[in-house]
């Protein structure tokens, strides 16, 4: 059951990142807010997803 929750959480993070791609300079403040509100694991997930998205864009 935990696996399904993790996939759902990753999917939500991916969707949020897609929405936020239209805005500039959002990642730093978002990460800061997540960490300050005890959501460091979600902040780390954002960083990993963003890093993989950035590396995918560089290879394209």
Image: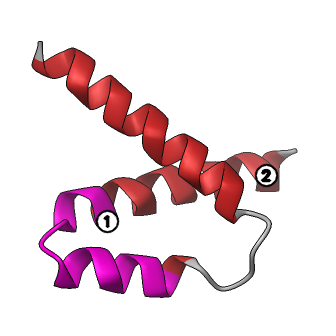
Quarter holding the N terminus is top left
48 vs 41, nearest the viewer: 41
Q: Determine which residue is flagged by label 1.
A: 43
56 vs 41, nearest the viewer: 41
Disc 2 packing (10 Å; few <14; some 14–19; many ≥20) = few
Residue at the (44%, 77%) spot, across then down: 30
Rendered view: 15 above or below 48: above
Q: Is residue 59 magenta?
A: no
Majority secondary structure of magenta residues: helix
Quarter holding the C terminus is top right
The percent position of residue 32, horizontal first and vertical second, equals 33, 86
Residue at the (19%, 85%) spot, across then down: 36
The residues colored magenta run: 28-43
Rendered view: 49 above or below 7: below
Tell us which disc is closer to us: 2 or 1.
1
The percent position of residue 41, horizontal first and vertical second, equals 20, 58
Left/right of residue 26 with respect to residue 10 in the rendered view: right
Labels 2 and 1: the sequence-earlier one: 1
In three-dimensional space, the C-alpha distance between marks 2 and 1, rounded to whole angstroms, equals 21 Å
Residue at the (58%, 42%) spot, across then down: 15
Rendered view: 58 above or below 5: below
Numbered marks: total: 2
| Element carrying mark 2 | helix
Q: Is residue 42 magenta?
A: yes
The percent position of residue 34, horizontal first and vertical second, equals 28, 74
| Element carrying mark 1 | helix
Q: Determine which residue is flagged by label 2.
A: 57
């Amino acid at each position: 059951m935990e696996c399904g929750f993790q996939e759902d959480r990753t999917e939500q993070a991916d969707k949020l990142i897609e929405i936020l791609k239209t805005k500039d300079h959002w990642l730093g403040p978002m990460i800061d807010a997540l960490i300050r509100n005890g959501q460091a694991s979600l902040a780390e997930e954002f960083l990993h997803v963003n890093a993989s998205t950035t590396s995918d864009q560089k290879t394209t």
